[in-house]
Image (tube, rainbow, N blue to C red):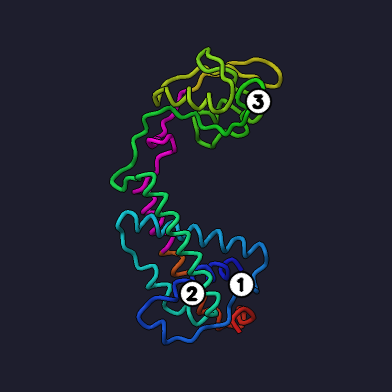
């Protein structure tokens, strides 16, 4: 069934291509999807649009549309195609606008110049409450959910924003002394910070070269999967979705 949803995701691509116009539309539409499948469909379609935007922003070409066009149109209705295509275009343009606004660089991996602790936090009366320590992060071995970070290098922390500001002023590789509340008792933790790259607006910098590679791989894989799915529409197993 997951393959069926992925097939629907790429139906938008059937609108282009040299010979697609000669292929009659099929009968697969969104009415056969459950609420869960529909939610997955639109979220996945959005992620594909963002991947296309990444490649477009960096001036990269790909054969995603050409591959997916071959054979897909025969599986879907004209209405489903138009709806998916319109949504895809809106999401792609939105992603492109965001990349231009952030002035993302396609030329190289951003340099990590600021400290990174690696925790998810929220406000607490005593400081910043740790809700999770990111796997593989500097904090993973020392902090756990429920800890409250009350100070950094002896300076009090009023909440998540102030903690983030203090950590970012430190260099990657620096050792930071944290004052904690754990299970109602005061404790200390010493952690060597990792590094994180941030843009001029303080947002996590995008590693565009890595995103280009992963986007191209994902788009290529799904184009092939969807073409295969359209072939399966002709078999008895999938006939209920295609007739």
Quick one: quadrant of the N terminus? bottom right
Residue under numbered circle 2: 228
- Foreground residue, 217 or 104? 104
Quick one: quadrant of the C terminus? bottom right
Of badges 2 and 3, the one in the foreground is 3
Whether residue 38 appears in this view of the structure is yes
Q: Which residue is drawn at 66% across and 28% down?
A: 146
For residue 124, which numbered disc appears in the image? 3
- Callout 1 crowding tier (Cα within 10 Å): few <14, some 14–19, many ≥20: some
Mark 1 falls on what kind of element? helix
User: Is 155 situated above or below 18?
Assistant: above
* Quarter of image, res 178: top right
130 is within the stretch colored magenta: no
For residue 30, which numbered disc appears in the image? 1
Of badges 1 and 2, the one in the foreground is 1
Q: How far from the left and from the top, in percent, is residue 175?
A: 45, 19
User: Is 170 situated above or below 47?
Assistant: above
- Which tag, 2 or 3, sits closer to the chain's start? 3
198 is within the stretch colored magenta: yes
């Amino acid at each position: 069934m997951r393959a069926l949803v992925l097939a629907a995701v790429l139906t938008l691509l059937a609108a282009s291509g040299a010979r697609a116009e000669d292929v009659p539309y099929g009968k697969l539409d969104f009415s056969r999807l459950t609420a869960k499948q529909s939610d997955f469909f639109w979220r996945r379609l959005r992620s594909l649009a963002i991947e296309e935007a990444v490649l477009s922003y960096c001036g990269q070409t790909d054969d995603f549309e050409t591959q997916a066009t071959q054979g897909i149109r025969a599986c879907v209705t004209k209405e489903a195609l138009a709806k998916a295509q319109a949504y895809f275009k809106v999401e792609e343009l939105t992603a492109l606008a965001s990349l231009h606004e952030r002035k993302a660089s396609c030329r190289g991996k951003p340099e990590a110049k600021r400290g990174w602790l690696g925790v998810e936090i929220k406000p607490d009366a005593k400081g910043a409450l740790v809700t999770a320590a990111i796997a593989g992060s500097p904090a993973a071995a020392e902090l756990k959910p429920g800890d409250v970070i009350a100070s950094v290098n002896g300076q009090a922390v009023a909440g998540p924003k102030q903690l983030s500001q203090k950590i970012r002023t430190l260099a990657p590789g620096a050792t930071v002394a944290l004052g904690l509340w754990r299970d109602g008792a005061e404790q200390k933790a010493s952690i060597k910070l990792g590094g994180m790259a941030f843009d001029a607006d303080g947002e996590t910098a995008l590693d565009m070269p890595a995103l280009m590679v992963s986007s191209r791989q994902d788009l290529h894989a799904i184009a092939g999967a969807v073409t295969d799915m359209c072939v399966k529409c002709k078999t008895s197993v999938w006939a209920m979705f295609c007739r």
